[in-house]
Image (spheres, grey):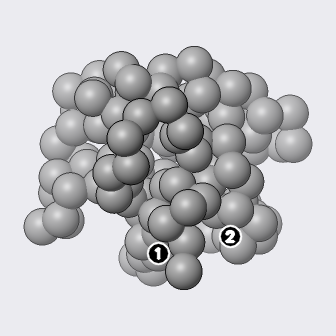
């Protein structure tokens, strides 16, 4: 499940639609949740995340490749640089935080 914060989705909605379609094409079952419930999810961890991704541990996803692809697709050149953060949450409780913009990757 992709859960962008409402403002994030408002600014980058077309990119999230493309990301959802691309993930479905490679075999993921994708649900894009851009409503207020996603806002609660992005705030639930004590830190604000612009995007929360929930994955099943049995999805077989290569997380590094998935995160790199998300960073590439969601990088923003048209907006002033602001730190945008994403978080992957696996159903076994494992969590990975990452910058959404390629330019912010160390």
Name the mark on residue 63: 2
Res. 71 visible in picture: yes
Q: Which residue is mark 1?
A: 96
Residue 77 is left or right of residue 69, and the answer is left
Marks 1 and 2 sit apart, C-alpha to C-alpha, by 9 Å
Q: Is disc 1 in contact with disc 2, using a CB cutoff of under 8 Å? A: yes
Residue 37 is left or right of residue 54, and the answer is left
Name the mark on residue 35: none
34 and 86: which is toward the camera: 86
Callout 1 secondary element: strand
Residue 7 is left or right of residue 24, and the answer is left
Q: Position of residue 89 (x, y in %)?
A: 45, 65
Q: Residue at x 70, y 62 (%)?
A: 68
Q: Position of residue 34 (x, y in %)?
A: 37, 26
Q: Is residue 105 above or below residue 85?
A: below
Q: Position of residue 50 (x, y in %)?
A: 34, 47
| Residue closest to the far right | 26
Q: Residue at x 17, y 52 (%)?
A: 43
- Locate the C terminus by quadrant: bottom right
Q: Position of residue 95 (x, y in %)?
A: 43, 75
Q: Is residue 68 above or below residue 10?
A: below
Q: Is residue 2 above or below residue 87?
A: above
Of callouts 1 and 2, the N-terminal one: 2
Q: How many marks?
A: 2
Callout 2 secondary element: helix
Res. 92 visible in picture: no
Q: Residue at x 12, y 67 (%)?
A: 46
């Amino acid at each position: 499940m992709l859960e962008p914060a409402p403002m994030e989705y408002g600014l980058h909605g077309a990119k999230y639609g493309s990301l959802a379609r691309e993930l479905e094409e490679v075999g993921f079952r994708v649900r894009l949740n851009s409503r207020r419930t996603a806002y609660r999810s992005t705030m639930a961890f004590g830190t604000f995340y612009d995007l929360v991704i929930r994955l099943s541990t049995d999805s077989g996803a290569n997380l590094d490749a998935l995160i790199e692809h998300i960073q590439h697709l969601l990088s923003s050149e048209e907006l002033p640089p602001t730190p945008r953060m994403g978080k992957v949450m696996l159903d076994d409780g494992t969590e990975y935080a990452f910058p959404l913009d390629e330019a912010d990757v160390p």
